[in-house]
Image (cartoon, rainbow, N blue to C red):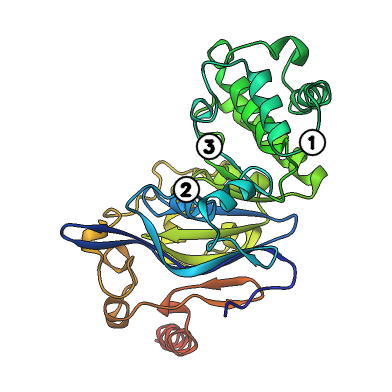
Amino acid sequence: MASEKPNALLSVHDLSVEFPGRRGTLTALDHISFDVARGEVLGIVGESGAGKSLTGRAIIGLLDPPGRMSTGEIRLDGERIDTLTREEMKSVRGSRIAMIFQDPLTSLNPLFPIGEQIIETIQAHGDLDEAAARRKAVNLLQEVGLPAAEQRMSAYPHQLSGGMRQRVVIALALCADPELVIADEPTTALDVSIQAQVIALLKRATAERGTSVMLITHDMGVIAAMADRIAVMYAGRIVEIGPVHDVLHSPRHPSTRGLMGTIPKLDHDTETLVQIDGSMPRLAAMPLGCRFHPRCPHAFERCRAEAPPLELENAAGVACWLWTPDETARRAAAFAEDASD
C-alpha cells in the first residue's frame, strides 16, 4: 500500500513505465514516487529524455502504445485512477485533471472556431445550456487576458498568434475547474516577452482557484518564478526533490548542480557556462548503479554498483551516495585532514 500524505491531492507511488519490443523490454520510468499537495505547484525538471513528459502522460492515462505501466499506483484525492477503464479515465481527464501541452495547436481543432471548442468542453463537463456556456467561455477568455474576447470567439486557431493560442489552451484547461493542471512545457514555443505573461497568468489563475499544478519544464527560470517545490529527474528516476529555494540555491545531487551551472547569473562575471560532460544514457544501455555516475566527477565504487534510493524527509530528499551519513562523515574527516596539513 502506498503511503500517502494527508494533504496530498496527487500521490504517485513506485511508478514504472516500460516499452516492450522485439529486442526486450525498455524501462523508461523506474520506480518514481512523489506527491502534489492541494494548491501546490510542483516543478518537474531535467534534461531532454529524462522522463518528464512521460510522467505527465502516465498520470492522465495517455501513454502511447506499446508503453504501459508495469508497477505502481496513482491516486487522486485518495482514489486510484490508474486502474480505471478507458471510459472512466475520460471522465477524470478534463474535469478533474487538465493538461496543457507545449504546442497549443495539438490541443486545438483547426476546423472549428475557438469559441465552439470551449463551449463544447464546458458542456461536456457540466450541465449549462449553450447560452450560459457561451457566457462562461467569454469570461474565461477575458480572465486569461485574450484581447477582444467576445470577437475572438469566432476566430480559428490559425488566425491567432502563438501567445493567444496558449491563452486559449489555458482557458480550455480551466473551464471545468480541475483539481490538478499538468502543464507540459507551456511556454517553450513562445517568445520570451510572452513567456512571462503566460507564467503570470497560469500562476494567478490556478492560485485563485486553489488548483494544484504539476509544471513540466527544462527552464529553471520558469520554475523559479512559479514552483513551490522541484523534482529533478534523470534517466527515468527522480534524483532530488525539495523546496524551490533550497534546490535552486543549494543543489545536492551532481546532476542538479550541473543543471544549475548551465544558467548564467547576472551577479557573476562568467565568460563560460558549466557544461555537463557526456549525454543521457539510452534506454537500451542504462548503466548499473547510479545512472548519472558515468558523467559524475564525484563518483566512487558504490555509485557504479548500487542505485541510491531517494530518501525523503519533510518532502525533500536526494538519491546520491555522497549524502549518506557514512559518506558525509568520511568527506568531513578527509577535509579536516587536508586542512591540518
Name the residue located 82 percent from the left edge and 43 percent from the top edge.
Answer: 208
Q: Closer to the camera: disc 3 or disc 1?
A: 1
SS for dot 2: loop
Q: In the rendered structure, which amino acid carries the disc numbered 1?
A: Asp
Looking at the rendered structure, which numbered label has been put on residue 22?
none
- Residue 172 lies, in percent from the top left, at 66, 32
SS for dot 3: loop
Q: Quadrant of residue 121?
A: top right
Q: Earlier in the sequence, mark 1 or mark 2?
A: 2
Looking at the image, residue 146 sits to the left or right of residue 255; the answer is right
- Residue 164 lies, in percent from the top left, at 63, 20
Name the residue located 32 percent from the left edge and 77 percent from the top edge.
Answer: 303
Q: How far separated are the C-alphas under marks 1 and 2?
A: 26 Å
Q: Closer to the camera: disc 1 or disc 2?
A: 1
Looking at the rendered structure, which numbered label has been put on residue 101?
3
For this rendering, which residue is in front, 293 or 122?
122
Name the residue located 63 percent from the left edge and 11 percent from the top edge.
Answer: 155
Q: How far separated are the C-alphas under marks 3 and 2?
A: 12 Å
The answer to whether residue 200 is visible is no
- Residue 43 lies, in percent from the top left, at 58, 53
SS for dot 1: loop
Q: Quadrant of residue 3?
A: bottom right
Location of the N terminus by quadrant is: bottom right
**Mark 3 burial class by Cα count in 10 Å: few <14, some 14-19, many 20+:** many
Name the residue located 76 percent from the left edge and 38 percent from the top edge.
Answer: 126
Looking at the rendered structure, which numbered label has been put on residue 62?
2
Q: In the rendered structure, which amino acid carries the disc numbered 2?
A: Leu
Q: Is residue 298 above or below residue 44?
A: below
Q: Is residue 176 above or below residue 230?
A: above
For this rendering, which residue is in front, 91 or 2?
91
Looking at the rendered structure, which numbered label has been put on residue 127?
1
Q: Earlier in the sequence, mark 3 or mark 2?
A: 2
